[in-house]
Amino acid sequence: MQVRAAIERKLTEALSPTRLDVVDDSARHAGHRGHKHHGDGETHFRIEVVSAAFSGKSRVERHRLVNALLAEELAGPVHALQLATLTPDEAAA
């Protein structure tokens, strides 16, 4: 399974987001120090998740939640995540 598809599936199943954008930024990092090629090259992602599951949680708690959900990917092919984690009210503002 492609990394992006796995990320989308896991976040959708766990967070029931009202919006989920997963952007593969790996090509922007090719050749940079620390960039490693893994299989299909999916190593760097920009993710925006809007979910009621984030209500009452700090930004750190939200990021920890997402990182825990994606632990398998972070232990393997994914080198970096850029996260925006919002509640539906925050996204509407």
Image: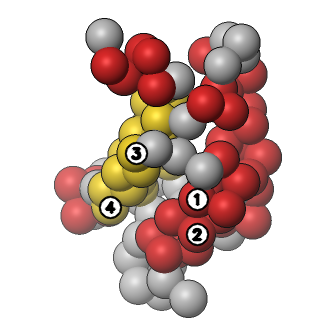
Q: Is residue 14 above or below residue 76?
A: above
In the rendered structure, which amino acid carries the disc numbered 1?
A: Thr
Q: Position of residue 39 (x, y in %)?
A: 48, 86
In the rendered structure, which amino acid carries the disc numbered 2?
A: Arg
Q: Which mark is residue 9?
A: 2
Q: Is residue 4 above or below residue 39?
A: above
Which of 79 and 54 lies nearest the eye of the viewer?
54
Residue denoted by label 3: 19
What separation in Å lies between label 4 and label 3 (alpha carbons)?
A: 17 Å
Question: Judging from the image, what secondary structure is the residue with disc 3 in?
Answer: strand
> Are discs 2 and 1 less than 8 Å apart at CB?
yes
Residue denoted by label 1: 12
Q: Position of residue 87 (x, y in %)?
A: 52, 23
Q: Position of residue 38 (x, y in %)?
A: 50, 78
4 or 1: mark nearer the eye:
1
In the rendered structure, which amino acid carries the disc numbered 4?
A: Asp
- At a point 68% along the width and 33% down the height, the residue shown is 53
Residue denoted by label 4: 24
What separation in Å lies between label 2 and label 4 (alpha carbons)?
A: 15 Å
What separation in Å lies between label 3 and label 1 (alpha carbons)?
A: 9 Å
Q: Residues within 10 Å of mark 1 (few under 14, many from 20)?
A: some
- At a point 32% along the width and 19% down the height, the residue shown is 92
Q: Residues within 10 Å of mark 2 (few under 14, many from 20)?
A: few
Reading the chain from its start, which is encountered first: label 4 or label 3? 3
> Are discs 4 and 3 less than 8 Å apart at CB?
no
> Are discs 4 and 1 less than 8 Å apart at CB?
no
Which of 35 and 72 lies nearest the eye of the viewer?
72
Which of 62 and 92 lies nearest the eye of the viewer?
92
Can residue 47 be spotted in the picture? no
Question: Judging from the image, what secondary structure is the residue with disc 2 in?
Answer: helix
